[in-house]
Amino acid sequence: MNYRDWLQQLIYKIINPVVKGMVKIGITPNFITTTGLVLNIVAACVFVYAGLHKPGELAYVGWGGGIVLFAGLFDMMDGRVARVGNMSSTFGTLYDSVLDRYSELITLFGIFYYLILQGYLWGSMITFIALIGSLMVSYVRARAEGLGLECKVGFMQRSERVVLTSLGALFCGIFAGCEAFDPMLILIVPLAVVAVFSNLTAFVRIAHCYKLLMKK
């Protein structure tokens, strides 16, 4: 069992009581997925609002990061509710995948716009590259699965991207008063890691698919 599977099982044990409660009162996986998207839209709005009306007040960045992290729980719960409540469906799988992409891209757009408004052009470019990488990781997997190939390899998958982005924003807000260095680096450095490794993951997946196809 790799670290992702071990961590996933640990989180499942924690959220299972909540999941069973949701199933009991009739909450559907698609409702949970939609709620996750709405929360990410709210987080993006917080970033944009902070850039437009609260320049220099990094507490808003922290709140945005906290909302993104909370929304990430819904991303795990929708699939769990579907399995525990026997509500899995082909449309639900498609709906979840599409809204996950929207959630991630909307969040990164909010951060991108915030950094531009604060004058961090290089930071906004890093965020844009992270956005491209995030999209391509999912796209390569989707195209591979359309060709009948399993393609889940690579380090920087959605859960890692969400955790790095949300914690970067959250701790940027927490350490807003730090004078030893620019607190904005706490947000930008994790985004740089996402930018590098998400694009690397996309190419690793392409190489993986090439090897599989060459064996056929």
Image: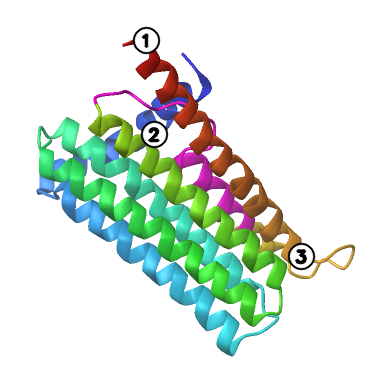
Compare marks 2 and 3 and give the one earlier in the sequence: 2
Q: State yes or no: discs 1 and 3 in contact (Cβ < 8 Å).
A: no
Q: Residue at x 50, y 56 (%)?
A: 131
In the rendered image, residue 156 lying in the magenta stretch gets the answer yes
User: Which mark identifies residue 215?
Assistant: 1
Q: Residues within 10 Å of mark 2 (few under 14, many from 20)?
A: few
Front residue of this view, candidates 184 and 11: 184
Cα distance between the residues tagged 2 and 3: 32 Å
Occupied quadrant, residue 15: top left
Answer left or right for 211 relative to 116. Answer: left
Name which residue type carries label 2. Ile
Q: Nearer the viewer, mark 1 or mark 3?
A: 1
Residue 106, x across and y down, in percent: 41, 65
The residue range painted magenta reads 148-169
Residue 90, placed above or below residue 168: above
Front position in the image: 171 or 153: 153
- Image point (32%, 23%), residue name: 150
Please name the residue shown 39% across and 63% down the image: 40
Describe residue 113's horizontal placement relative to residue 57 as left or right: left
Residue that carries the numbered disc 3 in the rendered image? 183
Q: Residue furthest right?
A: 180
- The residue singled out by tag 2 in the image is 14
Q: Position of residue 140 (x, y in %)?
A: 39, 38
Inspect the image, locate mark 1, and give the three-letter code of the amino acid beneath it.
Answer: Lys
Q: Quadrant of residue 84?
A: top left
Image label count:
3
Label 1 vs label 3: CA separation?
49 Å
Q: Earlier in the sequence, mark 2 or mark 1?
A: 2
User: Which is more foreground, mark 2 or mark 3?
Assistant: 3
Residue 117, percent from left and from top: 63, 82
19 lies above or below 117: above
Using a 10 Å C-alpha cutoff, classify the residue at mark 3 as few (fewer than 14 neighbours), some (14 to 19) or many (20 or more): some
